[in-house]
Image (cartoon, coloured by chain):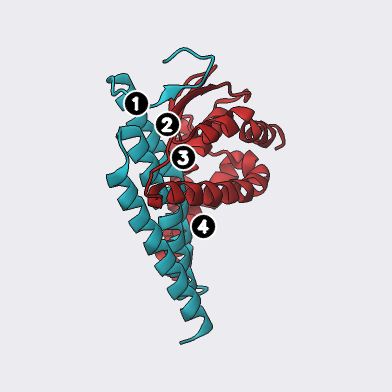
Amino acid sequence: MRKVSAAISLFVFWVLLSGHFTPFLLTAGAVSAFAVVVFARRLELVDPEGHPVDFSGSALRYWPWLGVEIVKSAWDVSRLIVDPKLPISPTLVRVKPTQVSAVGRVVYANSITLTPGTVTVVAGREEFLVHAITRAGAESLAAGDMDRRVTRFEGTR
Amino acid sequence: MTLAGILAFGLLSLGGVFCVIGAVGLLRMPDFYTRMHAASVIETLGAGLVIAGLIVQAGFTLASAKLVILALLIFFASPTATHALAKVAHESGVEPVARAREGEEAP
């Protein structure tokens, strides 16, 4: 099933990028998508990490929340930058990810980095080292709201 | 000017403003790590608003679909690149001006 879904995704990607709907190019796209899936299968790349289609549903719930967080924190960092006093208080903080899978931890680490004001410096199995531009940003990350949401994200497929 | 044109103009201008703010932050911040936070304003709100404006301008076309793919690429690739930079800086001993949170030893 994962292979079928990977082939369909690749074909849709081909059609969107090509924009030509002639029979030859559509056939070429289908053959290419099929060939890529066959090669990827031989390389054992079509797994939950290579084609994480299982997470589509939870991604649709998690991304809007992440988008709002990104806008809010980008606004906060912009205000810090334009403030004449530059009121930053850079802080290093260690957080413990509660996700069980590698995909879950990657989503959490990437979410931290994607929100302006916090960057994951070291992403370990047990612990992340995060650099935050303000003490308040470090505190709110340590409170663990994002961590809980990502754990829910990986749990509900 | 049509309504979509005005909306596109607004989004593109706002995106440009955030790119400039990010660039100013890049110059004002004291060290490597804090500069990185300023840069992430550019790649999230800056790039995001510019692409949103371009999508409004292009309308419901294949160009918009490609812009959505571009936005997804940026949103997956930029944190990865930022993390790679931060990790290498940390491992090669670039000292942050940051302090550890109370009750924790400095890393």
Q: Quadrant of the C terminus of chain B?
A: top left
How far separated are the C-alphas under marks 4 and 3? Answer: 36 Å
* Amino acid, disc 2: Pro
Q: Which chain is cyan?
A: B
The image's mark for residue A117 is 3
Residue shown at the point (57%, 41%) measured from the top left: A3
Say which colour chain A has.
Answer: red
The amino acid at mark 3 is: Gly
Estimate the spatial distance between the alpha carbons at disc 2 and disc 4, rounded to whole Å: 44 Å
Residue occupying image coordinates x 38% and y 62%? B17
Residue A100, placed above or below residue B44: above
Q: Is residue B45 above or below residue B12?
A: above
Report which residue position mark 1 lands on: B96
Q: Which residue corresponds to mark 4?
A: A12
Percent position of residue B51, x then y = 43, 62
For label 2, the SS is loop
